[in-house]
Image (cartoon, coloured by chain):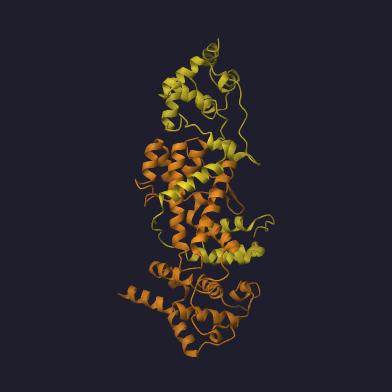
Chain colours: A yellow, B orange
Amino acid sequence: MPPSDPNASEEEVLLAFSVEPKRDRSTLDRYLAQYPEHASALVDCSLELLTLPTEISPVWVADSAVEAGWQKFRAQLGAAADAAVESPFAKLTPSAFKSLAVRLDINNLLLLRIRDRGIRAVSIPGAFMRQLATELGAPLKAVSEYLAGPPCLTPSSTFRSPGKPVAAGQVDFSDAVKTSQLTVEQQKKLLAMEN
Amino acid sequence: MVEPLKRISKKDGLYHRRAEVQALLEKLDLVGAPERIDQLVDAGGELRADIPPEALVHFIRRAWRENDAGSLERLFKALFRRVQASLAAAIPNSRMADAETIRGEIVSRFMDRFARDCREGGTWLDYFEVQFEGGFAAFRTTVLRRIGPSTNKTAPLMGDGEHSDATELAPEVEKAAAEFFADGPSFFDDPAFRSALGPAINTLPPDQKAVIGLWLQGIPIDAKDPTTNTIARILKCDEHTVRNRRDRAFKALRKILEEVKANAAK
């Protein structure tokens, strides 16, 4: 039996309990032994799980309530959501994303850094920006505005950080080109666009 | 690519989605956002009946990470409706006083927590990609313990004197209950029985609900072995009190059970 975690909150313990693959006496026994300080909450939770409805039927919810919920959620997501500009990359399937990289003659890594706004927009050569907008089928202004936004929390930076994650800093286009494992020819071509 | 979950279980390592959920995510990963939304959400904005809510949670997190504002709004609204439906089933107005206010508070706190986890990139939402209804039941439990009413909304089953733990039930009631539950907790595995009994258990007073719930999970009322978890030890009361509460719960539930058994026999 693993030792009890003195830092586990009631909510954490109950959530872990609730997603156990087996909801039976042995699981409840194990949690009660491991977290005696949360015994009462575990019993309450086990009863909630025991009486879970077998089927969830849709209920009528007023559109105004849904809209109010969305507006509140959006506000809670913070300034990043308020400033969110529709990403011109959002509708690309994984294969379309790879295909775009091929058409731009870059690799997926550099395109990911561009998509996640890890490159300062002002340092991206105009020729490359125009080519990107053309290949995306989006107005140049929309692409420029999107890339001028703050860097995104990428899935990797989101989950691998031991502490509160922050978006990685931005680099200049030339630095990104040199550090994205591109071929020498690709680097030359992209860096030439800066002139 | 479908990102694996990152939350770590102390016992088993990384958490994993259920196989059918993972397969669905991988299938939807191959299509563009507009088509994906159509496969997740119907024209009325509801999560489609054949789509598990775990998939909705996954794609909301992803839409946020990828700055896909259009998908984020449509998927969030479907989740909002789904959460309301879940709460309406778990906390109907008949269960407790002021149920509507309590449901509203739970929704509000869940959305706060959901937004915070999106914003900070935590792993709390991983639980909801593993088992949405279970995770939401756990979340609901923590909120109910803080803000819920101290008693369920239930009509007294007996007079005040009779309701006391110290008062014995008539022997014929105990005998009838024992006969009725002769099949033991395994009878609870029957889906028809379970779906009828769940809401009925929620109408019991908390002390009886705790006893019947633990008994149905196979916890013994008492045991000679001091290391065995028993209902009496968990609830910190004596065996006699536990049996009394169980038998009172049996009596209250008997009418519902009889109807279910009769229907099952047809």
Kindly give the residue lying farthest to the top in the view shown: A195
Q: Residue at x 53, y 36 (%)?
A: A82
Q: Farthest left residue?
A: B266
Residue B85 screen position, x and y as percent: 43, 57
B5 in relation to B170, above or below: above
Nearest the viewer among B264 and B38 is B38
Q: Is residue A19 visible?
A: no
Identity of the residue drawn at 51% across and 15% down: A126
On screen, B241 above or below A96?
below
Measured as percent of width and height from the top left, residue A15 is found at 56, 56
Residue B160 at x, y percent in the picture = 55, 84
Query: Quarter holding the C terminus of chain B?
Result: bottom left
For residue B38, which quarter of the picture? top left
- Tell which of B45 and B172 is nearer to you: B45
Viewer-side residue, A160 vs A61 = A61
Residue A83 in the image: above or below residue B78: above
